Image (tube, rainbow, N blue to C red):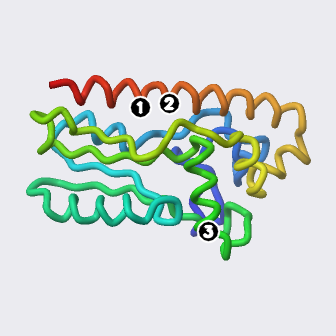
Amino acid sequence: VYSNTGGQASKATPLGAAARFAAAGKPTGKKDLGLMAVTYGNIYVARIAMGANPTQAIKAFHEAESYEGASLIIAYSHCISHGFDLKRGAEHQKMAVDSGQWILFRYDPRLKDEGKAFQLDCKEPSQPLKDYLLSESRFAMLHRDFPERAEKLLEEAEAFNKERWALYKGLSEVLNRK
């Protein structure tokens, strides 16, 4: 969300999240800036969550800094508009990764010839997406105010996450062929 404008929905707001101008839940999936950048083929790209995997995050910073071209690191950044106790930020980031809501990866064009350019740095989702989503008020309020719509959007979000995981896994296999 755009927190500095009062929590407005943005293209990066997840499917089903309630926000200003999306009180009944955002009906579309979020854009995938990381995947867009990977399609250029010559940009170092990483998606990190320091609380979920600090080693992966530090490795991404080192790789990005050493890359001669453009580098993009997209970091999970929780905020007050997500509606959970921010003291639990690291735990919450781990939930985001374990539920498949935030997929960790690194794309390093220097490793194309070795068949290691695209590295998935997390495992297939192992935690129910619903557990993660309902831990945030931006999703929980939708279940309270519009329970039928919330369930429909949750089903769509679960399908979206499964498709996205399959896409990332497939991308890893295709880009890592020698």
How many labels, in total?
3
In this picture, residue 111 sits left or right of residue 74: left
Q: Nearer the viewer, residue 22 or 88?
A: 88
In the rendered image, which quarter is residue 65 located in? bottom left
The N terminus, quarter of image: bottom right
Q: Is tag 3's residue or tag 1's residue first in the polypeptide sequence?
A: 3
Residue at the spot 41% in from the left edge and 29% down from the top edge: 169
Q: Is tag 3's residue or tag 2's residue first in the polypeptide sequence?
A: 3
Say which amino acid is labelled 3.
Gly
In this picture, residue 73 sits left or right of residue 40: right
**Crowdedness near tag 3: few (<14), some (14–19) or many (≥20) residues, C-alpha within 10 Å:** some
Residue at the spot 53% in from the left edge and 40% down from the top edge: 30
Q: Nearer the viewer, residue 158 or 173?
A: 173
The C terminus, quarter of image: top left
Seen in the picture, residue 143 relative to 137 is either above or below; the reply is above
For marks 3 and 1, give the CA distance.
25 Å
For marks 1 and 2, give the CA distance.
6 Å
Say which amino acid is labelled 1.
Tyr
Q: Is disc 1 in contact with disc 2, using a CB cutoff of under 8 Å?
A: yes
- Residue for badge 1: 168
Secondary structure under badge 1? helix
- Residue for badge 2: 164
Residue at the spot 61% in from the left edge and 33% down from the top edge: 28
Seen in the picture, residue 29 relative to 85 is either above or below; the reply is above
- Residue for badge 3: 89
Q: Which mark is residue 65?
A: none
- Percent position (x, y) of residue 24? 78, 41
**Crowdedness near tag 2: few (<14), some (14–19) or many (≥20) residues, C-alpha within 10 Å:** some
